[in-house]
Image: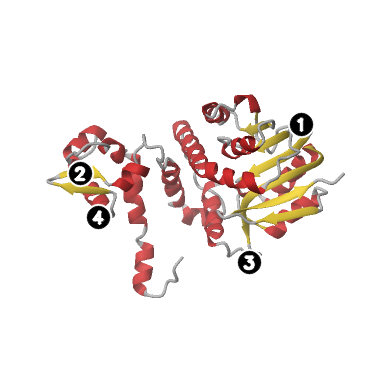
């Protein structure tokens, strides 16, 4: 992040939400998908989406100004950038932007969340929650496939026969791990309304034979036992310190004699300022969860030590979420 030095820098920072909102509204209205392989007027697009023609014209003019659309003789069309990443039928479609749109609404409640010390988003109806879950899982999958591939080279699966993926979502990470060790069996734990989505992702990769599923809340579910590896990605930031302490204990209790627990998450400096992405993510948890936060290496190590694991290692990754690894000793 560039240093803010002038009044103009402050003004640009304060108004930066405008660019974001233009893009997210276009995604929400499916404008890029509607324009795919077409030159269309604002009136034609407005008819497709059931919106006001003048307003659609003004929105698409702004999209031209920031490089996502082009306009010729009153008709609009996608740029190459939009075709590659913003059209829903594209293999590289950034479906994670639907989740970003949900985050935009959550972050608009930041002031009140700071006042009350927790999320102020308890007003979602059932349909909104369903849309949020699907968008969230898609966003995590988009990010997780590449990250999982990188992590598969950083972790040792040689002696792993049985693994648990806690809160595994789309199984983006554990599917990459299975590709490194095809004989490995994975138990993926997630909420009942998430598992059907998980199965679709796993079936698409043809890995059904490597997966079994456990429906439930990881804070209360019975994990069973005998796991050689338990993996938690993007889980600890949802919970409080004490919840994580108890969760790590549950994981360690479920490990085999020489089993390993791996936490993949943002790891903060002791003053909680760095990485800057983590400082912002702590606010994301404030507006989006009841008691979530980001945690330091010292805090995570404390959970391991409390659970009886003294062999703790940190591995830095290239994408910000580092690994905290604890090995159970006989």
Q: In the picture, residue 182 is in which quadrant?
A: top right
The label shown at residue 224 is 1
- Say which of marks 4 and 3 sits in front: 4
Q: In the picture, residue 261 is in which quadrant?
A: top right
Measure the alpha-carbon separation of dots 2 and 3.
Answer: 49 Å
Measure the alpha-carbon separation of dots 2 and 1.
Answer: 57 Å
Percent coordinates x, y for residue 219 in the rendering: 69, 39
Q: Nearer the viewer, residue 193 or 71?
A: 71
- Say which of marks 2 and 1 sits in front: 2
> Tag 1, which secondary structure?
loop
The label shown at residue 271 is 3
Percent coordinates x, y for residue 141 in the rendering: 52, 39
From the viewer's perspective, tell me whether residue 34 is left or right of residue 315.
left
Residue that label 4 marks? 65
Percent coordinates x, y for residue 123 in the rendering: 47, 40
Colour mapping: secondary structure
From the viewer's perspective, tell me whether residue 143 is left or right of residue 168.
left
> Tag 3, which secondary structure?
loop
Residue that label 2 marks? 76
The label shown at residue 298 is none
Question: Residue at horizontal 46%, vertical 65%?
Answer: 1
Q: Which of the two discs, 4 and 3, labels the residue nearer the N terminus?
A: 4
Dot 1, how many residues are within 10 Å of its Cα: few (below 14), some (14-19), or many (20+)? few
> Tag 4, which secondary structure?
helix
Question: Residue at horizontal 67%, vertical 35%?
Answer: 181
Percent coordinates x, y for residue 266 in the rendering: 60, 54
Q: Which of the two discs, 4 and 2, labels the residue nearer the N terminus?
A: 4
Measure the alpha-carbon separation of dots 1 and 3.
Answer: 37 Å
Q: Are the residues at dot 1 and dot 3 in contact (C-beta closer than 8 Å)?
A: no
Q: Nearer the viewer, residue 271 or 162?
A: 162
Q: Are the residues at dot 2 and dot 1 in contact (C-beta closer than 8 Å)?
A: no
Dot 4, how many residues are within 10 Å of its Cα: few (below 14), some (14-19), or many (20+)? few
């Amino acid at each position: 992040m560039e240093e803010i030095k002038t009044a103009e820098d402050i003004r640009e920072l304060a108004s930066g939400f405008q660019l974001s909102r233009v893009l997210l509204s276009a995604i929400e209205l499916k404008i890029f998908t509607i324009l795919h392989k077409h030159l269309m007027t604002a009136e034609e697009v407005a008819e497709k989406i059931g919106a006001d023609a003048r307003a659609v014209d003004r929105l698409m003019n702004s999209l031209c100004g920031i490089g996502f659309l082009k306009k010729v003789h009153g008709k609009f069309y996608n740029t190459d950038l939009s075709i590659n990443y913003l059209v829903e039928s594209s293999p590289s479609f950034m479906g994670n932007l639907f989740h970003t749109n949900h985050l935009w609404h959550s972050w608009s409640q930041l002031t009140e969340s700071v006042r009350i010390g927790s999320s102020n988003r308890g007003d979602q109806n059932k349909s909104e929650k369903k849309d949020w879950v699907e968008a969230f899982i898609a966003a995590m999958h988009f990010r997780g496939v590449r990250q999982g591939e990188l992590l598969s080279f950083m972790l040792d699966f040689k002696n792993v026969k049985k693994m648990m993926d806690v809160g595994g979502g789309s199984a983006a990470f554990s599917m990459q791990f299975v590709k490194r060790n095809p004989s490995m069996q994975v138990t993926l734990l997630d909420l009942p309304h998430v598992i059907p989505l998980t199965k679709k992702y796993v079936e698409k990769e043809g890995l059904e034979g490597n997966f079994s599923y456990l429906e439930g809340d990881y804070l209360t579910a019975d994990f069973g036992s005998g796991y050689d590896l338990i993996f938690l990605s993007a889980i600890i930031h949802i919970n409080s310190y004490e919840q994580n302490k108890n969760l790590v204990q549950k994981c360690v209790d479920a490990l085999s004699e020489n089993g390993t627990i791996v936490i993949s998450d943002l790891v903060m400096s002791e003053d909680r300022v760095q990485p800057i992405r983590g400082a912002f993510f702590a606010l994301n948890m404030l507006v989006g969860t009841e008691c979530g936060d980001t945690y330091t290496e010292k805090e995570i190590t404390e959970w391991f030590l409390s659970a009886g694991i003294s062999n703790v290692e940190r591995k830095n990754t290239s994408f910000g979420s580092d690994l905290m690894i604890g090995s159970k000793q006989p």
